[in-house]
Image: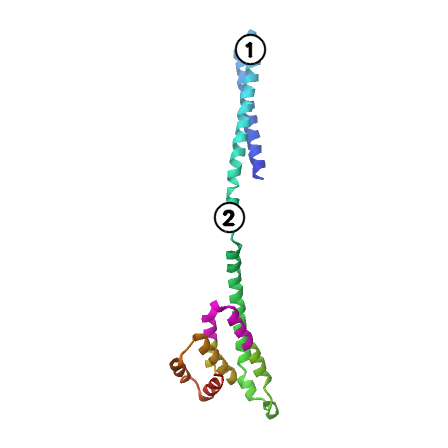
Amino acid sequence: MRKEIVLALGLSLMLVGVLVTQSKLRESVKSEPEQSLPKSDETPTAAARSSTLTGEADIAANREVDPQVEQPSVVIDESTSVPGQKAESARAPSAHTSIQSSFQLARTIFQQKEAIAKSSAEELHRTPKQTVAAAEQLGNIVELEEKYPGEAASFQDFYIECARDEKVITVIRSQCLDRYAKLAKLDKDQQGQLLRQFPPEIVRLFEALQ
């Protein structure tokens, strides 16, 4: 499209040159005697050739400039010559979105302590279905944790939030606390300080996991 515009501009300049030359010739013919007409026949031819050459030179010049106009596209190609970096940056938002979505789903599944408390005596003899679903979702979270080690801080925040949430199923709270302690790499003194913040039933289940 750019080449077509440049070519059209060059042709327009050539036509303008021809028209201007013809106009000057007409004026010279009117002002000169009749015997000078044969000489004037040669003059327009030379002028027309000069004008034509000028127009062609303009077109050639515009054509030489045209590749320079297209150079920005070359720069863009160079900037995209490292696909690995762009692929990595494209994956990061997707991973973050997937992790946060899993966290939100887990919160809903984990917060079923009250529902289990309302279960019948017969249901309590078996592992509640809410606990089974919560354990499966926690397994999914752990898989994401191992897949995206760069998001360790996000997983730590989620695990400690889960462990402190009184609406979460008790056994799941203890497992979240265990995952937090391991991910944060707490030593025995730090674990002792942490466990003092939780009720005895959570601490007992946590210690059973060690």
Can residue 137 be seen here? The reply is yes
Q: Please say if 192 is above or below 47.
A: below
Question: What percent of the width, then of the height, locates residue 180?
Answer: 46, 77
Q: Amino acid at mark 2?
A: Glu
Outermost top residue: 35
* 76 on left or right of 194: right
Helix, strand or loop for the magenta stretch, by majority: helix
Question: What percent of the width, then of the height, locates residue 123?
Answer: 61, 89
* Residue that label 2 marks: 78
Secondary structure at badge 2 equals helix
Q: In terms of depth relative to the viewer, which is nearer, 40 or 142?
A: 142
Can residue 104 be seen here? The reply is no
Outermost bottom residue: 121
Mark 1 closeness class: few <14, some 14–19, many ≥20 residues within 10 Å:
few
Q: Quadrant of the N terminus?
A: top right
The residue under the point 39% across, 83% down is: 192
Residue 81: mark: none
Q: Please say if 131 is above or below 121.
A: above
The residue under the point 43% across, 85% down is: 198
* Residue that label 1 marks: 39
Task: State which region is magenta.
Answer: 138-158
- What separation in Å lies between label 2 and label 1 (alpha carbons)? 60 Å
Secondary structure at badge 1 equals helix
Q: Please say if 87 is above or below 37.
A: below
Q: Amino acid at mark 1?
A: Lys
Residue 117 lies in what quarter of the image?
A: bottom right
CB of mark 2 within 8 Å of CB of mark 1?
Answer: no
Q: Is residue 208 on the magenta stretch? A: no
The residue under the point 51% across, 48% down is: 78
User: Viewer-nearest of labels 2 and 1?
Assistant: 2
